[in-house]
Image (cartoon, helix red, strand yellow):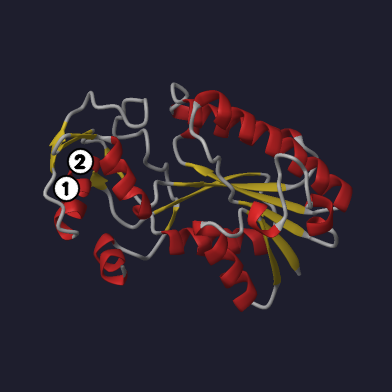
Amino acid sequence: MKIVVIGGTGLIGSKLVQQLTARGHEAVAASPNTGVNTLTGEGLAQALAGAQVVVDVANSPSFEDKAVLDFFETSGRNLLAAEAAAGVRHHVALSVVGTERLQASGYFRAKLAQEKLIKAAAIPYTIVHATQFLEFLAGIAQAGTEGQTVRLSPALVQPIASDDVASAMADAALGAPVNGTIEIAGPERFGLAALVQRYLAAVGDARTVVADATAPYFGVQLDDRSLTPGEAPRLGTITFETWMTQR
């Protein structure tokens, strides 16, 4: 089966292409690096010719409110139109647990706009909501840093390793469309501030993390429900300790 992975040269996309290929499928890595641009439409028709499934794991290069909304709306419209013309039978998209709850954030507003486009299109679909990636911990720490102090919310998170995300996306791509949303998460829950402190200590970073319930997380305040999944998500198998060891 031919499966086109939009964003196929990125963190999740490259792992997904490898997994699909190992399972015996023709996985095409589509990104600006390979001549496929969903913003301009360049290369889309050629990449999608003969494809049964498209998996969109691309992300915006800018998180500025207008730029990120323009990215997800423009690329979403172009991609879904090209899929309809090519006769694609299943659209799979990676989104974020908490998208609908964190609409004070421009990024989450843009992701919700992307999801609405998918649901309004005629192509059968599966939306995968993932929790925050373990690979984001360094960036989360940096975003909360003031001098040698990192100020972060103590709210619960359930982060997932990118390898587990890729496995879940591969299964979704090879399964039947659910015409709805499924959630995936890591096997462990932590307080965000405590987890980042543990991560920094493990990598020899001397910064100190301060738990502050009012500290913004990329522009929004968190509670224990904000970034955690609902009932019965698909759980990954890679724990924080295993992930650190693998690194």
Q: Is residue 19 above or below residue 99?
A: below
Looking at the picture, which amino acid does disc 2 mark?
A: Ala
Judge from the rendering whether residue 195 lies leftward or rightward of residue 38; answer left or right.
left
Identify the residue under disc 1: 197
User: Which residue is rendered at x = 72% and y = 63% of the image?
Assistant: 3
Q: Residue 221 appears at what percent x and percent y? A: 31, 25
Nearer to the camera, 82 or 213: 82
Q: Answer yes or no: is residue 99 visible.
A: yes
Q: Is residue 54 above or below residue 143?
A: below
User: Which residue is rendered at x = 81% and y = 53% of the image?
Assistant: 88
Q: What is the secondary structure assignment of the residue under circle 2?
A: helix
User: Which residue is rendered at x = 31% and y = 71% of the image?
Assistant: 246
Q: Residue 125 appears at what percent x and percent y? A: 70, 47
Q: Residue 178 appears at what percent x and percent y? A: 66, 49
Q: Residue 209 appears at what percent x and percent y? A: 14, 40
- Please tell me how crowded label 2 is: few (under 14), some (14-19), or many (20+) other residues with Cα within 10 Å: many
Q: Is residue 76 above or below residue 189?
A: above
Q: Answer yes or no: is residue 118 visible.
A: no
C-beta proximity under 8 Å, tags 2 and 1: yes
Identify the residue under disc 2: 193
Judge from the rendering whether residue 126 lies leftward or rightward of residue 142; answer left or right.
right
Instruction: Give the image quarter of residue 111.
Output: top right
